[in-house]
Amino acid sequence: ACGIACRPPPQLLPQPSVEQIFDTTFEATAQITAFFGNKLTTVDTDFPQSSYDGELRISSGFVISPDGYVLTVAHGVLYVVTEDSAGGMIITDRIQSSRVVVTLPDQNGGYSEYDADIIAIDGKGDIALLKITPSVHLHHLLFRPKEKVILTGERVMMIGDPFGNDNTSCAVGYVRDGNWKDSTTTLWMTGVTTDIATCPGNSGSAIVDQWGQVVAMHLYGKPAPRSRNIQHESKQEIQ
């Protein structure tokens, strides 16, 4: 009878802390090492990249299923050859890596390496789906439901392995634009821009919301950190 003024306030669920989100996501964060070129018979064991006569690229990625599907950026496992033309830079060839290795935290506090197969590559969207064969079910990240839109000003966290030294890192920031579109000659996608600080090797990192659910994957950092909006995609859709 006292009306609206007497109703108790709604009970809000406590949000996880940054530390709690990191603790629940870092085990699904991968370092992606791609080797290009021909395998050599004589190598320097102190420098694994000497196993091949081409380039080595290191990027980040994350596990999306317990049986070993991993998402990363296409440019981490695909070498694009370009040349100048009258109309600007054009792509003349795409060279797939000779070998891809996924490194993940293991249950013993160390790291395990897995050779990965490239299942699918979306060059325009800059996304690659990898598959490894683990001996146990892997910790994996969940996608945020597609009906829950990404809002400008929303707090997000980037989880990746940017330094190539099996040292998972995180950075916190806010969404600057939740509906960024890129329709250039090389990319066609929707995504988000954030103010998260990035560094080389962050490409492929998961962007998660305040509940630890994946909303995007980091692509590159200029002029602002930009990420592919993949919250609505499944591995079947990517394939």
Image (tube, rainbow, N blue to C red):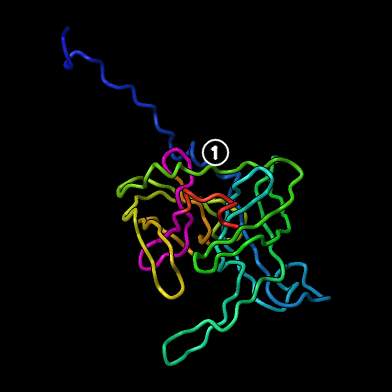
Label 1, residues with CA under 10 Å away: few <14, some 14-19, many ≥20: some
**159 and 78: which is toward the camera:** 78
**144 and 155: which is toward the camera:** 144
**Residue drawn 69% across the image and 60% down it:** 101
What residue does disc 1 label? 24
**75 and 118: which is toward the camera:** 118
| Rendered-image quadrant of the C terminus | bottom right
Amino acid of disc 1:
Thr
* Mark count: 1
Q: Position of residue 193 (x, y in %)?
A: 36, 58
Left or right, 11 with reference to 52: left
Rendering quarter of residue 197: bottom left
Quick one: which residue is furthest to the right in this view?
41
**Residue drawn 67% across the image and 71% down it:** 97
Quick one: which residue is furthest to the top in this view?
1
Rendering quarter of residue 39: bottom right
Q: In the figure, 21 relative to 2: above or below?
A: below
Left or right, 135 with reference to 28: right
Q: In the figure, 168 relative to 39: above or below?
A: above
Q: Position of residue 2 (x, y in %)?
A: 16, 9
| Rendered-image quadrant of the N terminus | top left
SS class, disc 1: helix
**Residue 184: within the magenta?**
no
**Residue drawn 50% across the image and 68% down it:** 124
Left or right, 209 with reference to 4: right
**Residue drawn 39% across the image and 27% down it:** 13
The segment highlighted magenta reads 209-229
Q: Position of residue 80 (x, y in %)?
A: 57, 77
**Residue 228: within the magenta?**
yes
Q: Position of residue 26 (x, y in %)?
A: 56, 45
